[in-house]
Image (cartoon, rainbow, N blue to C red):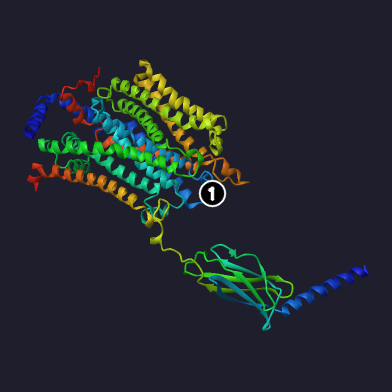
């Protein structure tokens, strides 16, 4: 019984010390973008109290509409505190024509969690609606030309005939002697 | 040349004795002149059903739709859309019974054309109402016009429905002009507003050769126009299904299959309408056993065509029994929908294809009984196209609630559907109480030209 108390107190002390040590050493991250031999790299620099930290696993994401898109696997920081990711060049841009890059340290035993957000223009610009390909599955503005032409020809042909018939009807009224007399 | 034709028309009219014409006029105007007790009771009954439908719709729109209707993620269309398809099919009656017969010179069309046209107009109006009843957000109806894509079959449907309503209304109105003048001259003891309405709508009709010429030209143009329009409206309705992602509806046969079904329904509905008007308005001299004989023959022909398209629609895929389509086919052949499916095949196709082959079955009463059965079967046929089709989505979900997989219409839905039927019959009834349901001049014209076959075609 006494031993179990000791174990619980020991466990609490260890947990507290872990927590205390994590809170003592908060990591901060910074994202830099470099290009080497036309290959794009994203370098995440991890520091704690202005000192570069090594051996911390960093993960890189790009924010999408509903969730985060991981860019490769996690990379551990080197002795300079840098984690280097090769960055893809084909990520579609958001509504502002940019992408939001997020670097994260998740549940590190020494530094806990940290993240940094950065905006980048390393993305494929969104095409404006008018620039998209015309197709049957396209938007209202991107209906195929042949489709618009054929539909309008049919519509004008049919409604033109209906209007012609209605105008003809007024001829009946015009030829009425009875109505002319009343006027 | 033109003058000769005008003169000959005039001469023809002068050969018709005034006495004969007056007798015909008084007989055909009788339903407009007086409304009996039963007529009033019938109209009151229809109005009550319509009011019940309005109340049901109010409940549907103000309470939670999850409670008031049985529509769920799988069966998101349900009985409203099957009712819509039924009404669109019914609206083709105008195409077949008026336009096609007129253009192909089947002279017995004359007393039938106006009945067919008013049924067509009222049916297409109620088809539109059924669509609105089915909408989850009817307040966004105008979005179809503001944001609709021309590539979407829904937009084609809206366009073609509006065009068909307009063309059908004008085609109903134009041959009515001389009749309105007849009403204005021969009806008496009617309210002033009603007489003024006749005079206003008759466009100053005097029956001059020039006026006849314009009138007939307009009728001819619209009669030709309404045929492709009618076929388009039902074909587009079929494409609404065929372009929706359900394996059962992946069919290139759908347009023709729907149109042929609509023609069968049109003939059956015409038989019922002719029987009712004949009895209720005592029009036995104009709607004769000859008409039933001809309509019975048309019923056989249309049934055979419809059976042909059904064979293509069901038996060819059944030979392959591929993938998801097999679920649907097995469900209707031997599964839970089998009793309804085989009843529809028997009563809606086999009975009208075989029984009217016997002359005795083409008499008014037996043929009307057959036609009523066909109309009921035709409604359930649309139910079978819509509901079991929706029950088998491409991406089935595990552990879905039971209410998603089994659809049966709620009381609110059935009340609204009943009200649409009542509204359709109310429009036809009220029309026939204000305007002659048989075109006086068209029948007279047929008689004058020596075409006695209109009344005694033998």
Instruction: Using the rendered image of the protein, determine whether residue B172 is visible from the camera's viewpoint.
Output: no
Write down the quadrant of residue B118 in the picture. Answer: top left
- Up/down of B87 relative to A30, above or below: above
Left or right: residue B307 compared with residue B278: right
Total marks shown come to: 1
- Up/down of B396 relative to A20, above or below: above
Q: Nearer the viewer, residue B299 or B407?
A: B299
Left or right: residue A13 compared with residue B195: right
Q: Nearer the viewer, residue B435 or B41?
A: B435
Q: Nearer the viewer, residue B311 or B374?
A: B311
Task: Give the image location of residue B120, x and y in percent.
Answer: 32, 37
Instruction: Using the rendered image of the protein, determine whether residue A35 is visible from the camera's viewpoint.
Output: yes
Pick out the residue farthest to the front: A37
User: Which image quadrant: the N terminus of chain B?
Assistant: top left
Task: Give the image location of residue B270, x and y in percent.
Answer: 33, 29
Q: Secondary structure at mark 1?
A: helix
Pick out the residue farthest to the right: A2
Chain letter, disc 1 residue: B
Write down the quadrant of residue B45 in the picture. Answer: top left
Q: Which residue is the site of mark 1?
A: B66
User: Which image quadrant: the C terminus of chain B?
Assistant: top left
Task: Give the image location of residue A19, x and y in percent.
Answer: 75, 75
Write down the quadrant of residue A28 in the picture. Answer: bottom right
Residue lying at 47% horizontally and 69% vertically, measured from the top left: A97
Task: Give the image location of residue B177, x and y in percent.
Answer: 19, 38
Residue lying at 20% horizontally and 30% vertically, measured from the top left: B442
Left or right: residue B291 compared with residue A93: left
Q: Dot 1: within a 10 Å radius of its alpha carbon, few (fewer than 14), some, or many (20 or more) residues?
A: few
């Amino acid at each position: 019984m006494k031993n179990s108390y000791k174990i619980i107190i020991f466990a609490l002390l260890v947990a507290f010390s872990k927590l205390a040590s994590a809170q003592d050493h908060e990591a901060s991250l910074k994202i830099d973008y470099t290009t080497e031999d036309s290959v794009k790299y994203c370098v995440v620099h991890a520091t704690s109290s202005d000192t570069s930290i090594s051996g911390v696993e960093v993960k890189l994401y790009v924010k999408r509409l509903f969730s985060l898109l991981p860019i490769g696997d996690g990379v551990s920081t080197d002795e300079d505190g840098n984690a280097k990711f090769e960055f893809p060049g084909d990520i579609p841009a958001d509504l502002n024509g940019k992408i939001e890059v997020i670097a994260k340290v998740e549940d590190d035993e020494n530094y806990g969690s940290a993240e940094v957000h950065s905006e980048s223009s390393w993305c494929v610009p969104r095409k404006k609606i008018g620039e998209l390909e015309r197709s049957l599955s396209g938007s209202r503005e991107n209906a195929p030309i042949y489709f618009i032409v054929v539909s309008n020809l049919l519509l004008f042909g049919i409604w033109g005939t209906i209007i012609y018939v209605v105008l003809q009807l007024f001829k009946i009224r015009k030829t009425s002697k009875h109505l002319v007399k009343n006027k | 040349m033109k003058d000769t034709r005008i003169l000959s028309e005039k001469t023809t009219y002068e050969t018709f004795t005034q006495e004969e014409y007056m007798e015909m006029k008084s007989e055909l105007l009788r339903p407009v002149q007086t409304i009996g007790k039963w007529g009033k009771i019938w109209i009151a009954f229809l109005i009550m059903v319509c009011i019940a439908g309005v109340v049901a719709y109010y409940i549907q729109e103000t309470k939670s739709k999850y409670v008031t209707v049985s529509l769920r993620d799988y069966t998101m269309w349900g009985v409203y859309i099957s009712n819509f398809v039924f009404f669109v099919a019914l609206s083709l009656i105008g195409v077949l019974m008026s336009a096609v017969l007129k253009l192909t010179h089947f002279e017995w069309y004359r007393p039938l054309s106006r009945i067919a046209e008013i049924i067509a107009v009222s049916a297409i109006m109620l088809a539109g109402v059924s669509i609105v009843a089915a909408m989850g957000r009817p307040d966004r109806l105008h979005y179809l016009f503001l944001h609709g894509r021309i590539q979407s079959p829904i937009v084609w449907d809206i366009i073609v429905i509006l065009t068909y309503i307009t063309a059908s209304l004008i085609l109903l109105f134009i041959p009515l002009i001389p009749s309105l003048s007849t009403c204005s001259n021969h009806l008496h003891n009617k309210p002033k507003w009603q007489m003024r309405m006749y005079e206003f709508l008759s466009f100053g009709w005097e029956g001059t050769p020039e006026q006849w010429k314009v009138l007939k030209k307009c009728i001819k143009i619209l009669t030709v126009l309404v045929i492709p329009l009618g076929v388009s409206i039902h074909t587009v309705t079929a494409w609404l299904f065929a372009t929706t992602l359900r394996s059962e509806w992946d069919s290139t046969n759908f347009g023709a299959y729907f149109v042929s079904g609509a023609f069968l329904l049109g003939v059956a509905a015409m038989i019922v309408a002719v029987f009712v008007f004949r009895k209720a308005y005592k029009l036995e001299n104009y709607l004769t056993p000859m008409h039933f004989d001809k309509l019975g023959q048309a019923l056989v022909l249309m049934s055979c065509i419809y059976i042909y398209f059904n064979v293509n629609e069901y038996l060819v895929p059944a030979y392959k029994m591929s993938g998801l389509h097999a679920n649907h086919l097995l469900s209707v052949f031997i599964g839970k929908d089998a009793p309804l499916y085989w009843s529809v095949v028997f009563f809606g196709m086999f009975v009208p294809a075989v029984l009217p082959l016997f002359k005795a079955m083409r008499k008014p009463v037996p043929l009307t009984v057959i036609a009523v059965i066909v109309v009921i079967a035709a409604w359930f046929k649309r139910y079978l196209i819509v509901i079991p089709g929706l029950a088998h989505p491409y991406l089935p979900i595990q552990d879905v609630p039971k209410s998603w997989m089994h659809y049966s219409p709620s009381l609110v839905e059935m009340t609204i559907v009943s009200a649409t039927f009542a509204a359709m019959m109310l429009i036809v009834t009220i029309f026939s109480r204000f305007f002659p349901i048989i075109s006086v001049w068209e029948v007279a014209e047929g008689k004058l030209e020596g075409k006695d076959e209109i009344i005694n075609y033998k």
